[in-house]
Image (cartoon, coloured by chain):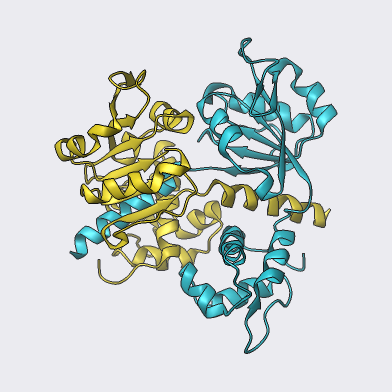
Chain colours: A cyan, B yellow
Amino acid sequence: MKRKISNAVIRRLPRYYRHVDDLHYNGEVRISSSALGNSMGLTASQIRQDLSCFGEFGQQGYGYDVEKLRAALANILGMNSGYKAIILGVGNLGSALIQNFYFSHNGFELVAAFDVNPSMVGTRVAGTPIYHMDDLESEVDRLKPDVGILTTPRSVVSKAANRLVAAGVAGLWNFTNVELKLIHPEKVIVENVHFADSLLALSFMLTTRENRT
Amino acid sequence: MKRKISNAVIRRLPRYYRHVDDLHYNGEVRISSSALGNSMGLTASQIRQDLSCFGEFGQQGYGYDVEKLRAALANILGMNSGYKAIILGVGNLGSALIQNFYFSHNGFELVAAFDVNPSMVGTRVAGTPIYHMDDLESEVDRLKPDVGILTTPRSVVSKAANRLVAAGVAGLWNFTNVELKLIHPEKVIVENVHFADSLLALSFMLTTRENRT
């Protein structure tokens, strides 16, 4: 990486991938930065500037080759890194992710789930084996996951997160809406999913529309 | 609203609220735009510019009054509008939202849930009554919800969404990762939750860190 990428760019990169992947799926072969911008609510110059952080993809007067841009974005996003994930907490949300989230579409392999419920341990959900939380360290040592997905009850999530970090897990995908209390925050990258941010954006748009009409 | 607010600002507003709400919770009474920027990964001038879209909140040399800024952001975000929501699909994800998402913290009231499973219809989950999808229109007419939360199976979500729009629901919060096929897209605001965007941002950060070390 040549220079520090801003958080705003990091947030736009997956959206670029998603839009370009849609174009690719629909059989489009090329797209101009202005057309891509239109579909994403960004300006053409913004897009050119963002993508220039990672090299030269577009061509003056031609735009972007969809297949090449998609492959480049996938690579930039680490989708070819063979990342492995485990999930902690097979409650409603954990089960929903195991059953419905397309891990492999995003370059991830979900290799195991963990819970403390004795009726679940030893079974599989949608093919994913469920282990007891007591076996977390030994299974992490065996499976070497890159990411731990946190869907435990809020009261136990920080402890579970610290066990993962101590066992060498480099990334945490936290769905609990708890600010994790980490003993070694410098050893891990935390991505928090904030459902509320999304609902409040919708709330804002509803309010704005009402004010306009 | 004085002028069109960009999508980027709309996305930052809930984050502002979240950070300022944390400060308020922790007893802070004022904050400078640079300190707020530091905690959010934004520049002070960006923050001043964003908030200036909605009026004058800060004071030169003082910064922002936390309580006032929090109240103003809540108001801007429509959190005092008394919005009501219903949820369609009480599977794993729907149940997780009903049981664990703090609707009231975000100014929303969850008034009903809908499913087709006869063993669920007529019961309550965490206090929320579950009705049959056959009664969707009559219950929408009675309850007048502002937002429909979509956690149905993918195969039925567009049909369900169109029924909500026809019944007068103004906002859809879509968790199915399906691009809704709407008969009247102009009549509704759709907010899609993309879990994959969040996982890919984490994937990118993991990859960048690896490249740096």
How many badges with numbers are in the image? 0
Q: Nearer the viewer, residue A140 or B178?
A: B178
Is residue A186 visible to the viewer in this orientation of the structure? yes
Is residue B20 visible to the viewer in this orientation of the structure? no
**How far across and down, in percent of the image, does residue A108 sit?**
71, 44
Residue placed furthest toward the bottom:
A61
For this view, does A187 lie left or right of residue B172? right
**How far across and down, in percent of the image, does residue B9 sit?**
42, 63
For this view, does A88 lie left or right of residue B183? right
Image quarter of the N terminus of chain A = bottom right
Residue placed furthest toward the left:
B142
Does residue B9 sit above or below B157 in this rendering? below
- Dividing the picture into quarters, in which one does residue A212 lie? bottom left
**How far across and down, in percent of the image, does residue B70 sit?**
34, 48
Image quarter of the C terminus of chain A = bottom left
Does residue A193 sit above or below A72 in this rendering? above
**How far across and down, in percent of the image, does residue A46 sit?**
55, 75
Q: Nearer the viewer, residue B129 or B67?
A: B129
Give me the residue at 42% from left, 38% from top: B151
Give me the residue at 28% from left, 64% from top: B55
- Dividing the picture into quarters, in which one does residue B12 lie? bottom left
- Dividing the picture into quarters, in which one does residue A117 lie? top right
For this view, does B38 lie left or right of residue B65? right
Does residue B211 sit above or below A2 in this rendering? above
Give me the residue at 60% from left, 68% from top: A27
